[in-house]
Amino acid sequence: MEYRLTDFLPTTKKELELRGWDSVDVILFSGDAYIDHPAFGAAVIGRTLEAAGYRVAIVPQPDWHGDYRDFKKLGRPRLFFGIAPGCMDSMVNKYTAARRLRSEDAYSPDGRHDMRPEYPTIVYTKILKQLYPDVPVVLGGIEASLRRVTHYDYWQDQLRPCILLDSGADMITYGMGEKTTIALAQRLSDGVPISQIRDIPQTVYLSTKADIPGGITDRDIVLHSHEECLKNKRSQAENFRHIEEQSNMMHAQRLIQGLGGRYVVVNPPYPPMTTQELDASFDLPYTRLPHPKYKGKRIPAFDMIKFSVNIHRGCFGGCAFCTISAHQGKFITCRSKESILKEVKQVIQMPDFKGYLSDLGGPSANMYGMHGRNLNACEKCRRPSCIHPQICPNLDTNHQPLLDIYHAVDALPGIKKSFIGSGVRYDLLLHRSKDEASNQAAMQYTRELICNHVSGRLKVAPEHTSDRVLMLMRKPSFKQFYEFKRIFDRINREENLRQQIIPYFISSHPGCQEEDMAELAVITKQLDFHLEQVQDFTPTPMTVSTEAWYTGYDPYTLEPVFSAKNPREKLAQRQYFFWYKPEERRGIEQSLRRIGRPDLISRLYDAPSKPHYQNENYRAKPHTEEPRKEKRRRPGHHK
């Protein structure tokens, strides 16, 4: 299908004129290239506003230097400026855990590094407030959403206040923002000043005590003030438990935090979207393509998802280092089969589609259709994870609805194979519930996944081998990885397949010691892995792991937690991933003697190991460090 320029949201004055517009209601400023696709937040919010009858324009990656012409070219919007800094946190997108520049910016044309500033939320807002001081500026996206209260910033190595203070913006819409943005646009359209809009769910604003609607009551949770957190790290840790719990409750409480004589007010989130509401968002008239201005340019993030389809929102895993539940919540909202098939048919019509879907997944590959059997219990639940420390007995883990989706997609003419590129929760596959039909579906799903939906390499995320560290990560025991690998290997033998299982691991996570990494090296050697997909822990705002790393306390128990922080400590842990490299051997042996574990030297270097050509898990390729969920994040986990 050929698309015209007017099939995209307008980005220039000329494109406004092509539509016959002389003004717009909302102008979105995006830190990413403009890709008109439901995996990219700015496009979702723009199309949502458009469907509600508003005139929307988008300015992707404006030049923030010089005379600010990109910020002035479309003039003044009738309602507000919206800031969409990007699908990924700008600092995670730009820097590795060692604070080194990444090889490319996946959300910019040709992977260029100079298309966005650090902290675009703050930079864009300050420019707009300088040019148009009376026009409301509303923040959305990952960067603002996860900085809605006092948070630790790894790249500045300090606590920062709510980003409203640093940016000067008027409001944050946190999480997945379709409903919030429409409600706000309607109120502003009705003539209500943004300073008087205080009751929309899933918004954050600054207020004096006197102007907080209803005043501060017993129903509110009053957090330790920003100033108290600066003085006392334990106070910051205590705050986080409330923040995480209220982000993942059906009926949350309002959060209030003192900040320099004023208060940050965090209104509770909307209830999870219904299937009909989620379908409506995905069924908007996206072209699914980059804007024509990028013709001839490669946008790496688009290449990754152009032939993929997202089938649900939310994740109940609650991994301690992951931001998905903080942004999307733990409750799963599924698209209908009809909506999914409609999008797959669109993909089939793309001119360069060869019949292979790269991913039919979501925040997690195999949570589609899963929910609590007794929803009344879910409405009262405070647990941030439905599967840790064990799978909730109320959780319906039936994989049959997901199998039905796979079968329906694979039956479409034009589909040769649908791959599953999202992360698979093998603890859900191994779980045995009281419902025998669910157990049978899990076994069927496991076999079908391995036989029909793996492109030679199945990536899973055990993250560590130490059960003590895994408990802090909120990940299942490594015994479950052993069990899953046995099943994987058996099915490969039975089906005469030669596929690989590729595990992800993290070093320097809170609670992890050098000895834990040494034992990880021995265990993964015994499994014949030469690790590829590894990462040094990166503290990102609004995760349990980050709070433990910064404060030194577990936010839930307030027990002390050790973290490797300086470059020497982090390198001492990271080196164990690469025990098989000759240049690492001397340092590892010195480390093992220093920590009193010389017994592991012989197990690493004297014990027999398969030659590389006999080791099916060995890949002779250089190590690459990938971003992971904030970090290992696919597009689509956006606001």
Image (cartoon, rainbow, N blue to C red):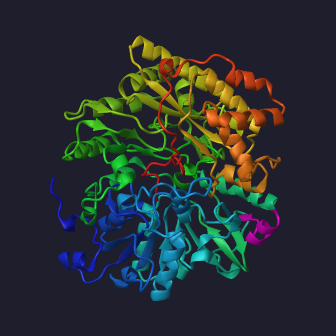
Q: What residue is rendered at 72% in x and 32% in y? A: 518
From the top left corner, tell me how far across and down residue 626 is, in percent. 51, 46
* Chain part drawn in magenta: 220-232
Q: Quadrant of residue 456?
A: top left
Depth check: give the residue in front, 584 or 481: 584
| Residue at the far left in the pictured view | 2
| Residue at the far top in the pictured view | 494
Q: What residue is rendered at 75% in x and 25% in y? A: 600
Residue 509 visible, this angle: no
224 is within the stretch colored magenta: yes
From the top left corner, tell me how far across and down residue 329 is, in percent. 55, 50
Question: Horizontal placement of 442 versus 358: left or right?
Answer: right
From the top left corner, tell me how far across and down residue 602 is, in percent. 73, 21
Q: What residue is rendered at 75% in x and 60% in y? A: 236
Task: Establish if 579 lies above or below 4.
Answer: above
Question: Horizontal placement of 17 versus 398: left or right?
Answer: left
Residue 554 visible, this angle: yes
From the top left corner, tell me how far across and down residue 469 is, in percent. 71, 37
73 is within the stretch colored magenta: no
Task: Establish if 366 lies above or below 62.
Answer: above
Task: Establish if 291 lies above or below 261.
Answer: above
